[in-house]
Each structure stands twice: as structure tokens, then as C-alpha cells.
Image (cartoon, rainbow, N blue to C red):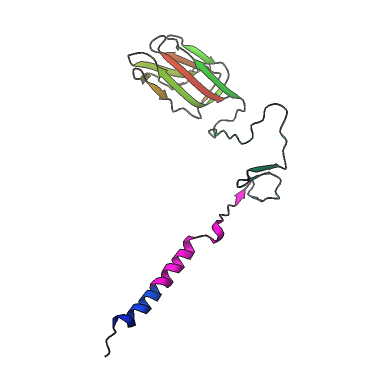
Amino acid sequence: MARLTRPQWFLPLAALVILIASSLYGQLMPTGNIVIARLSDGSGNTITSTSSALDVNIKSGSIANTSFTIGAGTANIGFVRMLPSSCSQSTSFTNTTGQVATGGGTTVTSTTTCVTFAYANNITNSAVTLRLADKQGTPVIWLGGNADFSLPANSAVKIPIEGVTFTSGITAIAGTGSAINLLINGMQ
């Protein structure tokens, strides 16, 4: 039996390694570095460049409006606002309440509101409790309750109530007067 010397086995092994590496490389690199995305509308129809929809060319930055009009007034082109799926209202709402009251609390709004963002700031050197409730006949307490939500001293907290709808409005009640500033954004 003849024994292979280095030059005889090295070339077939090198060719095999190159063949395997080139086939893997071809699978990892898309041809022409083009990524194709398939989009569909709510009915499952594929949206193409000829669909009756808003066409956006990301590479050039162009926007073609082919099926809807932009009414008079201020139009935000390219502005996207993410809303919780439970929000069905269409009017933006923002309220900044400085120094939330104790007892009966402070009325943030008297309109049914789906909250998209809430932020509280305790401006004192002591922990302070906060309660958020809706304003219906028998109020539902969404934050707080028997064991009120406690804000640490000198703190700022994002309150995790996105998507909660406060029926007939929002009331904020602080455990200590003039201690909490509150910012609430939502849809009405």
C-alpha cells in the first residue's frame, strides 16, 4: 500500500475546504445585498408599488400619496405614534398637573381617556403615595387602592398604565399635598 506524501493529500483537502466554504458563503450573502419585504393590508392583499396605498421609497426618501388626501391644517409627514391596541379614541390629550391634591384629589380630565404615557415626580424628601382613579359613578382605582402606590423621596417614575381607559376622566390623589407633579398623555 502506497503512503501519501504531503503534496498528494494536501491539494484534495484544500479543494474540499474551499468548495465547502464557498457554498456556505453563497448561502449567507444575498445576491446584490437586496432584501425583499412582503407587506399586506388588513385584508391580506399584498401591497405593491401599484397598490392603492401610500408608497414609501426608503432609499430615496420619496413618498407618493396615491389613495388618501391630507386635509387642511398641520400635517405631520413621517410622524408615527404607537398606541396601545385598547385605545380607540382619536384626539391627543396631554396634561401636566403640578402639586397633586390630597383628599378628593385633583381632576386631571373629565373626559374618558385612554392613557398612553404617565409620569410622576415626587419633589419632597419623603416617600409619598399616589392613587389614580377614573371618574365614573363608582370610581375604579387603576393605581393605588388600599395599598397606595408609593413614590420614593425625590424620585421620578414612569407609571406602567399604558392602554388603560379611565371612564369619565381621571382623578389623581396624593398622600401628601403639594408633593407630586404628574404628566399624563393619552387619547380622548
Name which residue lies at 59% across and 52% down.
38
Judge from the rendering whether residue 116 lies leftward or rightward of residue 146; answer left or right: right
Quarter occupied by the N terminus? bottom left
Q: Within the magenta stretch, is there residue 24? A: yes
List x then y, in percent, for residue 4: 29, 84
Residue at the spot 48% in from the left edge and 12% down from the top edge: 106
Q: Is residue 185 left or right of residue 60?
A: left
Q: Is 139 above or below relative to 88?
A: above
Is-magenta flag for residue 98?
no
Foreground residue, 154 or 145? Answer: 154
Q: Locate residue 52 relative to residue 25 in the image: left or right.
A: right
In front here: 82 or 7? 7
- Indicate the position of residue 21 as horizontal and vertical percent values: 42, 68
Q: Nearer the viewer, residue 121 or 159?
A: 121
Instruction: Point out the stretch of residues depicted in magenta.
Output: 17-42
Snapshot quadrant of residue 52: top right
- In the rendering, at what x and y percent does residue 34 appear? 56, 56
**Can see residue 188?**
no
Left or right of 24: which side holds 137? Answer: right
Q: Please tell me in which quadrant of the rendered image residue 128 appears.
A: top left
Classify 14 as above or below 99.
Answer: below
How far across and how far down the image is residue 84, in percent? 53, 33
Q: Is residue 107 visible?
A: yes
Q: Observer-nearest residue: 165 or 126?
A: 126
- Among all residues in the image, which is located at the extreme bottom? 1
Residue drawn at x 37%, y 74% is: 14
